[in-house]
Image (tube, helix red, strand yellow):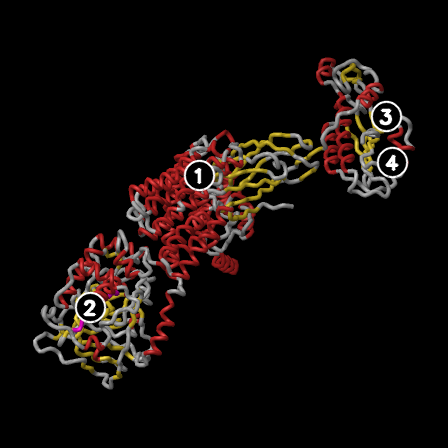
Amino acid sequence: MKALTSSTERVAAWSLLGCATFALVSLPGKDLPWPWLLAFTLPAAVLGRLPELARWPIRRALLGMVLQAAACLAALHDAGTLSRPAALACTILPPLAYVAIRRRDADAALGLFLSFCVLLVGTILGGFDPLVIGGYGLCACAVLRSESLLTALRHARHRTPGGQAPRSGALLGSAVSVTLVCLLCAIAIERTIRLLPSPSRADSSPNFADASQKNNNRSVGLDDSFILDGSGGVLSDLHGEQLVRVRAELGETVPSDLYLRSGFFAQPDLDRWLIGPLGLAQTNSVKAHQLHRPLPNAKEHWLEIERFAGASKFVLTPPGTFEVRDLAQLLVDPDREFLRQGPNAPPDTYLTGYQDLPLPPLDLPVDPRGEALGLTSLPADFDAAPFTTLLARWRVRGTPLQIAERIAQGLARHCRYDRIDPVGPYAHAIENFLFADGDRHGYCMHFASAAALMLRMNGVPCRIGVGLYGGVQDPSDSDARLYGSQHAHAWVEIPFVGRGYVVFDPTPSEQRGQGAPTPTDPGDAGLDADGGGGNFLGTLRKLGAFLSQPWLLLGVLVVVLATTLRPRHRSERTESGMPAQLRTPRRLLGRILRELARAGHVRQRRQTLEMFGRELASHDRLLPELQAAFAAYQEVRFGGRDFDPPRQVVLARALDAAAALVPLESAQDARRVSRTS
Amino acid sequence: MAATHHNIELTHRGRVLALLAGLAAAAAWLGDDANARIAAALLAAPLLVDFVKKQRHLHHTEIGVGKRFTAVGAAFTERLELTHRSPRPARECLLFEPRTMRVEPPILLPALQPHQPLRASMRQRSLVRSHVLERVFVLTSTWPLGLFRSRAVVVVPTELITLPAAVPLRAELKNAIAEREAAHLVRTNVRGAEFHSLREHQPDEDARGVHALRSATAGTLVRRVLRGSLPRIAGVVLDLRRPPGRRLDQGIRRFEWSLGICVSLITHLREHGIDLQVLVLDSEPTRLMVRSPRDQNDFFTLLAEASPAPHRAVPEEIFDELQRLEHCFWIPAGSFLAAPEFAAMPGTVTLVGEDSE
């Protein structure tokens, strides 16, 4: 390793080591136990500490091989074998350790690149860790800062006027400030890229076309994909706006735990669910359409649902809906409790009647028609073995409702709710969600999809229902609730005999209705699922949600770039170069000139005060106060005199005199009149 | 003529980072992959921050530097005064002058505070005989992250006159000059006219010669009488013409050598108190008198700008004055050794550099 001759070199060396350390920390400990980490870093680090070996490359290579082999054997003995992705990641570690320790001229750049690669591998394997990313960013910025300075110092052969050199404290301070800006910028860029219409995200269109061909009964415009990588769902194209306003009739309030279904998915797959076949039929009546007869012993509730632009093509209904009114061109599939309007139907407000039924008894059998409706099928290439292991571990058995409860409890223990796509070594998101080592996380789509697959494995027919959940109270009407795309949600629906589709929601209750991290962040609209956020934390959350809006960040980026690229004129120099003692008289003179301009005497560019005074005199408008003020200003500006109180008084009087000056035309008129008289 | 300007360019490191960021962004866009988005964001953020924070006012730096004479290849230390006319300080700037710092390293200015003059000295070396009317300095900075380089070209309207490198005079030539040097009539250290006596002032004489103190003492106007040695005058003919039929781009080494020996000769003669009447045979003959350091500088400036000229006959009467002089030196810088004008000169002419190359 080179001797560190200056504080800048020390900062650069330690920062590079920090980068390497954070990159190593980002690797998941389960996949890469520390003996293996040491095995892949220590030998290279030792070689990096022996620069004299560079004269004998063959000896160095031999020594390296021996050390590496010994270290690998020791690690194998201590920690066992490595997984394939982890072994692949380990191939980067020796060069990273070598260059981080050796630190020759180009080693910093190479070390940064390698450490970034390791960090990426760690993020892919172990998930996104903001602390590690932030720490790495800080070290990387410090490396870039110090290397930039070191390059300049090398070019100049350390020649600076007076031998001054930047201190390491200042260097680190600037690195910290740059890091903060960089991290903010990275967030903005990440969200901006999300906004771009990705070809992969648009994949649903061709699939939709295929599905349409298979199913002629389906109406055009219906979203039919439920993609498990965060970009699917019926409401996935909506951009964080308000969708519906629901108002309860008969003086009731809208329950906060109301589910509003906009669609469902019945055809399973590991990556995306499809709607499956539909049997839509057009109704003739606009006034009212009854889906089924209401149950006799349950109370009927009526909701008025007002749809905004983003939800104009959806018919949202709560579970237990028996009747819908005031909807034109209504297409209905009564077996699947599915409603949709025709393509050219007006987006009217409509009424829906529903019954809020309690959970069915444990022994209530499922609807036998479920199998005929395709609610028990599994994906074609479905490998049931790992699922069976999980179900066995969770002791899933009993009646359909008991099975559902066990699955929900098992999922709650086994996985964590997070609005980040699951990561892991598997090809499918649902497998990463359920079977990845370490931190298994996902959101409502993954919970619902996993539960639906497990239910079907146990012979319970079910489908995934999608729509809105939660909402916030309408500030203008306490009986109404507002729903935005941030309240998008997915759940499971099980058909029971005599009860229709019953909602079973495997998502942990406190996280329901937080939607999926679609390109439009669910929090964008600033609405809160817990009822408006009247407290300070709620306000902070709203502010955070507002500040993290992709369009806002994109706008800030554009403004910053535009400001940066705006050409600056040399005139700024003269203004900024004005001595401090001149600012006050300059300000006063500016006010005097503005008053004179108001009176019709505009001082031209490049016109000196003397020339301006002569022009005023030619109009017989040069008052003695103005003349004195101009002289006083010029004495201060060019004569090196102080702007003392007498001169201040002179300028203040001139300001009063200028303010009292009548406009030029009026004065000329008055003069003309006096001459005539 | 160069103009003060600035530009921003990607460094090698920045290019690699931009390429990686572009690839990652393309992958994120095509694959809609969250990890690729994170990678693209982490790679692009420092680029963006570096670009936004880049110093765009380096060209608002004023550099104060005076006129300078130097010789080809001679190292000198230039003292500069830099004033940064911008609201923000300029940081970690490398300053150099490409013309004179080809082998010298630039200097690093850690910080240029706004409107605060900073004095710096730079070791420089002009390698080409020239006379430049404006000096071009370059300020570069990669602050803060070294991904973009901000480069400003600052043009300073001042002269840099690079004379030919002086060539040592041969001993024979020095002896010839010494032999022809007459003894001083007045043994004094003071050159030129000095006080001799007083006499009455005549009404038609210039009043500036009146001795004020003596006139006041005597009560009448008294004026000084001065007597001194008249300066000797030698002639120098610098012939820049190429021989007939010879190309201008040949004989450059001899040309430069001749100019160098001309500098040495002029300096030597002036050190001996000899005034010089110089005739430069260029495209148009130029005549000038070298009597003072200023004249000498003017002549040296002419030497700095000299270039070989095509052959052209010179009217004979132009040599009339030179032929009357006590001694004359002929320097055939353009290698025109058989010039008929030289043959027509009297025997008091010494050919300088006849057997040099």
Labels 2 and 1: the sequence-earlier one: 1
Characterize the magenta stretch by its predominant secondary structure: strand
What is the three-letter code of the residue carrying label 2?
A: Tyr
- The chain letter under disc 2 is A
Q: Are marks 3 and 4 in contact (CB under 8 Å)?
A: no
Q: Is label 1 or label 4 in front?
A: 1
Q: Which residue is mark 4?
A: B318
Image quarter where the N terminus of chain A lies is top left
What is the three-letter code of the residue carrying label 1?
A: Ser
Membership of A344 in magenta stretch: no
Labels 3 and 4: the sequence-earlier one: 4
- For label 1, the SS is helix
Chain part drawn in magenta: A488-495
Circles 3 and 4 on the same subunit: yes
Residue A233 x/y as whole percent: 30, 67
- The chain letter under disc 3 is B
- The residue most toward the bottom is A284
Q: CA distance from mark 2 to mark 4?
A: 113 Å
